[in-house]
Amino acid sequence: MSTHVFGVRHHGPGSTRSLLDALERLAPDIVLIEGPPEGDALVALAGHARMRPPVAMLVYAPDDPSDASYYPFARFSPEWQAIHYALGRDLPIRFMDLPLANRIALRRREREESAERTAPDASSAEDDGAEPSAEPAEPWRGDPLALIAQAAGYEDSERWWEHMVEERRDTESLFDGIRTVMTALREQVEGELAQAPPILERYREAAMRKILRATEKEGFARIAVVCGAWHVPALEQRPKQSEDNRLLKGLPKVKTTATWVPWTYGRLSYHSGYGAGIGSPGWYDHLWSRSGDVATPWLIKVAQAFRAEGLDISSAHVIESVRLAETLAAMRARPLPSLAELNDATQTVMLFGESAPMQLIQARLIVGERLGQVPESTPATPLQEDLRAQQRRLRLKPSANDQSLVLDLRKPNDLARSHLLHRLRLLDVPWGRNGGREAGKGTFKESWRLKWEPDFEVALIEAGRWGNSIAQAATTAVVQEARRREDIGQLAALARQALLADLGEAIEPVIEQLQARAALAADVLVLMQAVPELARLARYGDVRKTAIERVDTLLDGLLARIFIGLPNACSGLNEEAAETLFEHIQGVHEGLRLLDDTRLQAQWQHTLSQLADTQSLQGIIRGRCCRLLLDTGAMDEEDAARQLGLALSRGNAPGQSAAWLDGFLRDSGQLLIHDHALWQLVDQWVCQLPEETFMQVIPLLRRTFSSFEAAERRQMGERVKRGPVALGSTHDHPGEFDRVRAETTLPLLSRLLGLEDGE
């Protein structure tokens, strides 16, 4: 009987090639792989025809799915290829590590103990003079290989490992070298630095040794162990079995469930999940798929990516880039060009030194956009099954790419897609982002950005507590959320989200909560927050008219209270509170425009007139009320000019005048550009301000004018440059009519209008 331990790097293509060569020479009769024992029941699915990496083994606690761990695999991962090697030869496969049932329980215990230590009534470290528990030393907290990399003159351990292991060709001596290096490194970390392994690492390695001993007792002749290089010395230089048993005895345990989920190369580049954190999964995939020349095919891919974005990249660029990469590799004493040399050559030859386009290569090729796939027979929750069925029926295939989708809600399939995406957002699965309808009444378009993330699988598992279908789960989640929310503005927004998701059974409970909260709300500002969302809800309607009729009744009651209470709510406000009220007044106004109710609009205009004529209010409120009255036709331009003249008169404080002007003009400079009388009043007011006063009001004026469009500001600047114009003048600028210049345009105008010469 013999045991052979192969230390690899998780997701290393060079390690994978060396491992497969070593397995062919060894011809083992069982393969042990570092990983959760819960995955033993899933390993057969790895050989399914529809299983396409990257994928991840997901192990979670059913009582709290957020307590989960991922074990991702790419097609170039040593563990994945070891699994396929064993499956192809009908060899037994076992995972060896501390079960997630124990690890999740340990995490929970640690959280509980941490909560007890930080509780307000818990005794603090200062009470007894005890020192707080120290964090692990830096080599254990980070990457122990960084010590060797630094000693060898490398900036980081990833580059060192790539050059010394992944690019190595003599595979026979590779694993002996890894064993020697890791043994020396662990001796240094645990000896010279006087740092014992963290307790979790001790548990894990003890569990690995326990499984290894049990396998040896079964009488296998040749055992192949595939594990992270760091663990090789711990598996070959074993302590007594009794020590491991004593360490593992009494560990807490919880119930767990395991399944396969799709993964992405983008997610594989994150420093999360088991064995993840590689910076260039797309590049590693390229290395795995190419056994000979890797530089030329890679640079061809780079050229194709740039051409797809409209950059002019020729074959000559590719040829020169290959030559430069090979030259750089030779100068740096590298046997072959690595990613660093290829990136340098790309930026120098193809991009002429520009660095910005390299971000495209980083995202599309170096990291990659591949999304894995799992077979339909993979264990899944009912909610996951329902989503997959709807994705097939609606032809919405998940993708790791950021895709745009415009839905025409007049088409049944697009409408069903919209309902699904809105329901998923209510379940905290934001597969689609934005999803807003185009501005205007009765629109039928929705714009979405779709990108599938692996974490959505966990969110779906968590959402399974609400129901077994997407519609049922979203309905229950909305009803529960409505009971939790106190703010009626948020409740109104939730009701509209339920409407967009076509959750008829959820809308009425939300409306009931709205009515209850609104009946108790005494603050007019709180009531105003709910009007915009309720107006959208009432305007766009629902197939179930009963709920919308109740919205109309609720809106009538809210608006009546707002019309009565708003004048008192506006008095005695400071500048900050006035700014908040400004936004609420604008929101109510937009909501009433959507409702298109003549009676309500007349009452609103009466309230605005009261506010505009109340001199004791903040200037920004009075100015906005005048502007809204002007926009709706309740105030003509002459009255608006009179109000502006009064607001900007010398008798008013300059700060109040500037605030009134801010409220009147904010977000639209067209009125000021096209109304000559208003322009003159503002111009004269600014010109008569003393220098000291002008410096005081200029921040407010700058905020007002910064809200204008760039084209509007440019027109205003040109008009000011032409100089002042007398009030009542019919021209925008001084000076007599230039007849000679005007006559030069007549021939061209004649040709454009098709007139005969002389006409």
Image (cartoon, grey):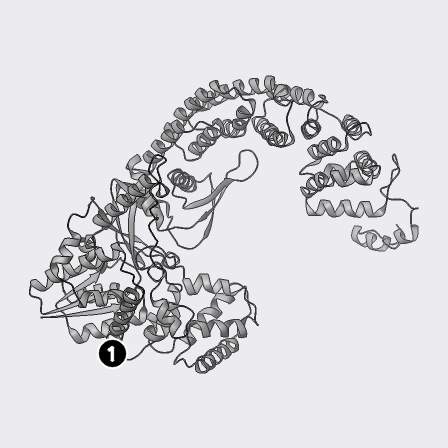
Give the quarter of the figure containing the N terminus: bottom left
Confirm whether residue 507 shows in the render.
yes
Q: Is residue 165 above or below residue 144?
A: below
Q: Position of residue 206 (x, y in %)?
A: 18, 58
| Left or right: 507, with 665 as reference point | left
Q: Residue at x 26, y 47 (%)?
A: 60
Q: Nearer the viewer, residue 341 or 658?
A: 658
Residue on which the image places disc 1: 173
Q: Residue at x 46, y 24 (%)?
A: 548
Tag 1, which secondary structure? helix
Q: How many marks?
A: 1
Q: Position of residue 551 (x, y in %)?
A: 48, 23
Q: Nearer the viewer, residue 370 or 332?
A: 332
Q: Position of residue 616 (x, y in %)?
A: 71, 22
- Amino acid type at mark 1: Ser
Residue 50 sits in which quadrant? bottom left
Q: Residue at x 82, y 55 (%)?
A: 748
Confirm whether residue 76 shows in the render.
no
